[in-house]
Image (cartoon, rainbow, N blue to C red):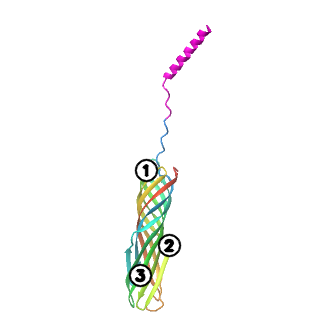
Amino acid sequence: MSSFIAAAALAVGLSQAATAADLPRKAPPAPLPPPPLTWTGCYVGVNVGAVRPRFELDGPFGGSASRDGNWGFAGGGQFGCDYQFAGGGFVLGFRNMFDGTTNHRDRTFSFVTPTGTGVATTDFRNRWFDALTGRVGYSWGPGLAYVQGGAVWSRVTADITVAVPAFVAVGSFSDTKTGWTVGGGFEYRFAPNWSAFIEGNYYDFGSRDRVIFTPVATACVNGCLFSGNTTAVSVLAGVNYRFWTGM
């Protein structure tokens, strides 16, 4: 009798196990979708490119000269932050970029003095520039088109040699001035924390004045004023690493 009861219990157990195996299994929960890509955050990066300056010089007694420089090397680094508005593609941000340059140009021009025609030779150099800009852009996924503008500081040096009848004078100036800049570009996120950009900019580095004195009474005895202005255009490309995203 006990053997019969054991056999019956085993049969019932096997039947229940078979029934449970036939029931559909509950599917595992679906993985959460990745968070939407956002440009909100801060970054640091490096850039490299080319800059072409234009040097202008106004001398005493109406003499003046201007010359476009050759394309020179520019390179440096940048940091900034962006904020992308929720539910849309508009992006606001700021950036500071510091670049060294190899811009260099010399120029000779003539001017008229009370004692005759003079000749001035100038040697311009643009050492570096530092641009602090705000930018406004529109994003569609990993791409961001933007325009920007703000202030720029630059170091410009110039050596001036003046030769007129009866004297030769030499002077120079080197200082840092504040100017302005505007530009635009395109940035692309090729990885969650990495992006690459290309952009073009225009810079006005402001004017610089220099007074040259001579030891004789023929001209410039009270000082001859030379005023220089430097502008430039640039084409830059770079990469950014976004170390803080999703503010």
What residue sits 44% from the left and 52% below the top? Answer: 189
* Callout 2 touching callout 1 (CB < 8 Å): no
> Tag 1 or tag 2, which sits nearer the N-term?
1
Q: Nearer the viewer, residue 143 or 226?
A: 143
* Label 3, label 2: how far apart the Cα atoms are: 22 Å
Residue corresponding to mark 3: 121
What residue sits 45% from the left and 59% below the top? Answer: 238
Q: Which residues are magenta?
A: 1-29
> Tag 2 or tag 3, which sits nearer the N-term?
3
**Quadrant placement of the N terminus:** top right
The amino acid sitting under disc 2 is Thr
Report if residue 219 is visible in the image. no
Observer-side mark, 3 or 2, equals: 3
Q: Which mark is residue 176?
A: 2
Q: Secondary structure at mark 3?
A: strand
Residue 180 among magenta residues = no
Q: Nearer the viewer, residue 19 or 130?
A: 19
Q: Which mark is residue 142?
A: 1
Q: Which mark is residue 43?
A: none
Observer-side mark, 2 or 1, equals: 1
Residue 139 locus on image (x, y percent):
42, 52
- Magenta stretch, main secondary structure, is helix
Classify 10 Å Cα crowding around label 2: few (below 14), some (14-19), many (20 and above): some
* Callout 1 touching callout 3 (CB < 8 Å): no
Q: Secondary structure at mark 2?
A: strand
Residue 246 locus on image (x, y percent):
51, 49
Report if residue 169 is visible in the image. yes
* Label 1, label 3: how far apart the Cα atoms are: 51 Å
Classify 10 Å Cα crowding around label 1: few (below 14), some (14-19), many (20 and above): some
On screen, residue 70 above or below 217: above
Q: Residue furthest front?
A: 3
Residue 228 locus on image (x, y percent):
43, 77
